[in-house]
Structures are given as structure tokens and as C-alpha cells.
Amino acid sequence: MHCGCEHSNATAVLARSTLTYGLACSLFSASDMDQDNYEDESIVPSGDALEEELPCLPPEISDGEAMELLWQLRSQRRQSSPELPETVSRLTAPDGSLLYLVGTAHFSDSSKKDVATTIRAVQPDVVVVELCQYRVSMLKMDENTLLREAKDINLDKVQQAIKQNGLMSGLMQILLLKVSAHITEQLGMAPGGEFREAFKEAGQVPFCRFHLGDRPIPVTFKRAIAALSLWQKARLAWGLCFLSDPISKEDVEKCKQKDLLEQTMAEMIGEFPALHQTIVAERDIYLTHTLRQATRCVEAPRTALKVPAVVVGVVGMGHVPGIERNWEKQLNINEIMSVAPPSRVGWVLRSVIKGAMVGMLGYACYRAGGSLGRVLLSLPTVKSVLETLRQPSALGQQ
């Protein structure tokens, strides 16, 4: 009986970890991105490692001949029947293109090895990862920097989250980041290692393109928060504030066991079905769409003949069943890209908070005196708050 309770508690911890990581693992990596530009979902992997492994080319060789040589080199490296880890699923597109889908646990060294093994064996045309343009900088930061950033929740990150996602979504994002930082500290490992491994390995494969396959994180946050009632938001926030369950590397590896994963996901659905829908199910659809877009025939150099593509997808293990279910379905991603306008309750809550801020500002100006008060009112942050407060009044007069 005692063992059963321990198993249930471990599953609950994994459920909460899966839920929170799906949203917050990469918040710290979005700080230096252009927040208005996420349409270009393809980036160029580094080719430094590739240059070291290529044979020396004769100086008189033409560009076309060089491309043909690289194409043949990759064909020779590509294994037709590779022995791959158990975490890899194989899906086939209508045109014969192949997708090798690597299911990972986000804080796992063995997942990094699974990714490297798969890319080296199949020499893909495209690698697709479960990231969006808002989180791409995590691919270019070293492990120590990521570890430090993950543990450091400061005022700048709070302001950035609120500016990017709105008040309620921003505050919830910070709470989720707090949980991710807790996991990072417990494991002593920065999240997203499998994505950085995929980026590095893609740079060693001739002609390989690197795509970002996830839905933009602001859309996911806003849809997730909008799907919750006020009581559910309060319940979730309370649980996140006091979440301190220990988690070990062994617990993380269990996330890759499909039977335990199903139990974990079921528990998560039971606690917050709306969150599961927006964080997992909807992103399953989006990831399936981007993976299918990538899994199309490619042109061979010189001949320009269309040949089936080989694609490697790197996603969290929790998304694998949904991608497999959606693979042959007709999908409409427009339905999962819209964000509903804020509710009346949210408007009232924001008005109360703004009113409190104005009250504190007025009292600060009164205590500070005339000259210092004018200095406070000239600060950009104060001006922004006052401008925001004026907007509803101006709209009401029109």
C-alpha cells in the first residue's frame, strides 16, 4: 500500500512537471528575440563541424560538382535500415518521404544521445524541433549560461512576460518559470539539451535544414489562460507557488516509458483538462502540421529530380501519441491560432490593479514633494501606466 502511494505521488509530480515544462522551460531564452517576428520558422545550423569532416576538394572543381560530391557523401552515410533507439517512431508521408520522430524527456542526457544517434544514422534533409522563434536563442547559448539564466528570475523577466503576454498570462508565466527553475536546480541541468544537440548534429549533415516546429509561445500562453475559469486560475497559481516536490533524473527518464506517460497524461487531464487541451492537444496539431510541411520531396542537385525526403523530428515524448494520431488527418491550424478577447472578470481585475498602482503613485508623489514628484511622473514606466489608464476613458468618450 505504501509503495502504491509513492508511485501515485511520483506520477503526480511528473504530471505537474510535464504540464509546467510545456509552457515555461524556455521563457528565459526569449529575452533577446524580436517579439513581433516569428514567421520565418527556418534557421541555418552551424557548418563548422561539417567543414572539419569533409574531404579536401580540388581547387578547379565547379560549384555543381561540389554539390554533387556532397550529395553522394550524404547518401553513403545514410543508413537504409538503421537501428534506432526505442524512443524513435517512423511515419511515412504520401509521397514516400520518411519522418523519424524522436520522443524526448526535456531534462535528459539519454535523450540527447537518442537525437545524435538518429541524425547520424539517417542523415536527414530536415530537422524539426519543438521550439518557436521566441525561444530560438536557447540553441545558441552555452549550458552554463542557460543554467544560470534558468535560476535567475528578476524584475526584467517579470516586466518582459507582462509586456509580451498581458498581466494575467505574464504573471502565470512567471509562476511556471519558477517551477522550471525548481526542476533545473534539482537536476543541475539546463532544459532543452536535446534541441541544442539536434542543432549541432544538423550542422554536420550536408544540405540539412533546421526548422522550428512549435506554435508561438505567446499564443499558447494566452489561449491556456483564457481557457481557465477564475477559480481554476487561482487553484493553478496556488499549486505553482507551493510546488516543491523533489524530482530526480530517474523520474525524468520515466517520462519516456509509454505506459507511465499515459498514466501521467491522464492525471494531468483530470486536474486541468482545459490546460491539457491548449498546452498538449493543440500543440500536437500544430507540430503535426509543421512536420508534414517538412516531410516533402526534395530536389537532387544537378538533375533537379524530386526524391523522397528524410526528416527527423525532435519533440517531447508527451506529444508523440498525438502526432501519430493526427498524422493522416485533415488539420486546420487557423482554429488554434486565434486568441479570444479578455473576459469581463479579467478587465475588472486589471482595473483594480491599475487603480491600486495609481493610488500608490499618487501617494508617492505626495510624499516626495513637488520637484521629486515631477521626476517620478517623467519616468517612462510611470508614463506608460498613465497612458494605459487614459485609453479606456478615451474609448468610452468616442
Image: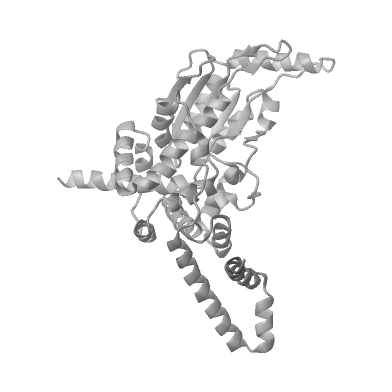
Which colour style is shown?
one colour
Residue 274, horizontal then vertical, whole percent: 37, 47
At x 45%, y 35%, the residue is 284
At x 58%, y 59%, the residue is 163
Decide: is 55 above or below 390. above
Which quadrant of the rendered structure holds the N terminus? top left
Decide: is 233 above or below 194. below
Whether residue 87 is visible, yes or no, is no
Residue that sits furthest to the right in the current view: 60
At x 17%, y 47%, the residue is 2
Which quadrant of the rendered structure holds the C terminus? bottom right
- Left/right placement of residue 153 relative to residue 76 reads left
At x 34%, y 33%, the residue is 257
Decide: is 190 above or below 45. below
Decide: is 211 above or below 80. below
Residue 268, horizontal then vertical, whole percent: 33, 45
Question: What count of labels does the image hold?
Answer: 0
